C-alpha cells in the first residue's frame, strides 16, 4: 500500500478517511474554518464539485457559478500549505494558505487569506467560505509591465482580478 494513496490531499499527513472524507459527507463536522478550508482543497483534488458549491456562503450564489468552479477543480492541484488560521473576536474565521496547481503545463501558486462565517442550520453549526483576499507584495517588488497583457483566457470568479487590486474578480471588476 502506497503512503500517498490513502493520505489526505490536504497535507495533514492523516488518512483521508480520518481527515477530510467525513467532512465531505457532513460538513458540520468541520468545527474550525481551517478544517473546512482543508476539506475544500481536498475536494478540488478529488473532483467534488458539489461539496465546494455547498460550502460557499449562500450570499455567494455559488450554484450560478458551478461551471467556473468545476473548471477550477479540473486543474491539477499540487499541494497545500496552511500559513495561518484563526477565529477572530467577531466570530469570523480566517485561513491564509498557499496552494500549488498546474495549468497548461505551467505551475502556479495561489495565496489567499480566506474568510469564513459560521451559521446555525437545523441546530447544527456550519462554517461557510464567503470570500478571500490576495496578499500583495510590497510596491518595490512589483515590476512595471512593459506592454499591456492580453489573453483569451476567461477569468474565474475566484481568480485574482486582472486589474491588480489583489481582490477576487467576483468582488472587484466581476
Image (tube, rainbow, N blue to C red):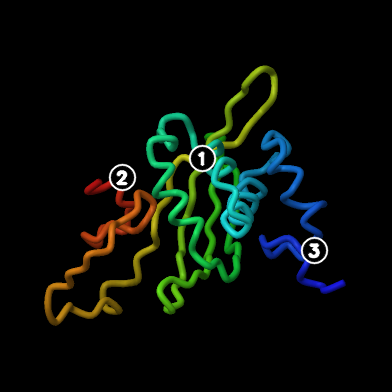
Q: Mark 2 and mark 1: span between their CA atoms?
A: 17 Å
Q: Quadrant of residue 62?
A: top left
* Residue drawn at point x = 21 percent, y = 68 percent: 151
Q: Residues within 10 Å of mark 2 (few under 14, many from 20)?
A: some
Q: Secondary structure at mark 2?
A: helix
* Residue drawn at point x = 40 percent, y = 74 percent: 104
Position of residue 70 measured from the top left corner of the image (x, y, whole percent)? 47, 50
> First in sequence: mark 3 or mark 2?
3
Position of residue 152 measured from the top left corner of the image (x, y, whole percent)? 22, 64
Q: Does the residue at mark 2 contact the one at mark 1 (Cβ under 8 Å)?
A: no
Q: Does the residue at mark 3 contact the one at mark 1 (Cβ under 8 Å)?
A: no
Q: Secondary structure at mark 3?
A: loop
* Residue drawn at point x = 39 percent, y = 41 percent: 65
Q: Disc number at residue 6?
A: 3
> First in sequence: mark 3 or mark 1?
3
Q: Mark 3 and mark 1: span between their CA atoms?
A: 24 Å
Q: Nearer the viewer, mark 2 or mark 1?
A: 1
Q: Nearer the viewer, mark 3 or mark 2?
A: 3
Q: Disc number at residue 53?
A: 1
Give the labeled residue for mark 2: 171
Q: Quadrant of residue 51?
A: top right
Query: Which quarter of the rendering shows the N terminus?
Result: bottom right
* Residue drawn at point x = 57 percent, y = 55 percent: 44
Position of residue 161 measured from the top left corner of the image (x, y, whole percent)? 28, 57
Q: Residues within 10 Å of mark 1 (few under 14, many from 20)?
A: many
> First in sequence: mark 2 or mark 1?
1
Q: Residues within 10 Å of mark 3 (few under 14, many from 20)?
A: some
Position of residue 50 measured from the top left corner of the image (x, y, whole percent)? 56, 41
Considering every residue shown, the one lying at the far top of the view is: 122
Amino acid at each position: 500500500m502506497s503512503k500517498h494513496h490513502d493520505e489526505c490531499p490536504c497535507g495533514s499527513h492523516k488518512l483521508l478517511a480520518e481527515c477530510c472524507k467525513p467532512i465531505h459527507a457532513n460538513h458540520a463536522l468541520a468545527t474550525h474554518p481551517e478544517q473546512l478550508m482543508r476539506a475544500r482543497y481536498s475536494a478540488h483534488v478529488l473532483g467534488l464539485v458539489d461539496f465546494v458549491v455547498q460550502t460557499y456562503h449562500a450570499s455567494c450564489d455559488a450554484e450560478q457559478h458551478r461551471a467556473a468552479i468545476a473548471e477550477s477543480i479540473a486543474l491539477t492541484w499540487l499541494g497545500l500549505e496552511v500559513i495561518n488560521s484563526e477565529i477572530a473576536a467577531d466570530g469570523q474565521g480566517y485561513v491564509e494558505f498557499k496552494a500549488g496547481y498546474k495549468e497548461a503545463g505551467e505551475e502556479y501558486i495561489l495565496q489567499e487569506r480566506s474568510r469564513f462565517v459560521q451559521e446555525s442550520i437545523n441546530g447544527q453549526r456550519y462554517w461557510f467560505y464567503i470570500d478571500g483576499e490576495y496578499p500583495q507584495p510590497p510596491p518595490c517588488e512589483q515590476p512595471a509591465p512593459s506592454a499591456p497583457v492580453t489573453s483569451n483566457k476567461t477569468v474565474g470568479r475566484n481568480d485574482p482580478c486582472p486589474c491588480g487590486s489583489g481582490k477576487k474578480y467576483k468582488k472587484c471588476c466581476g
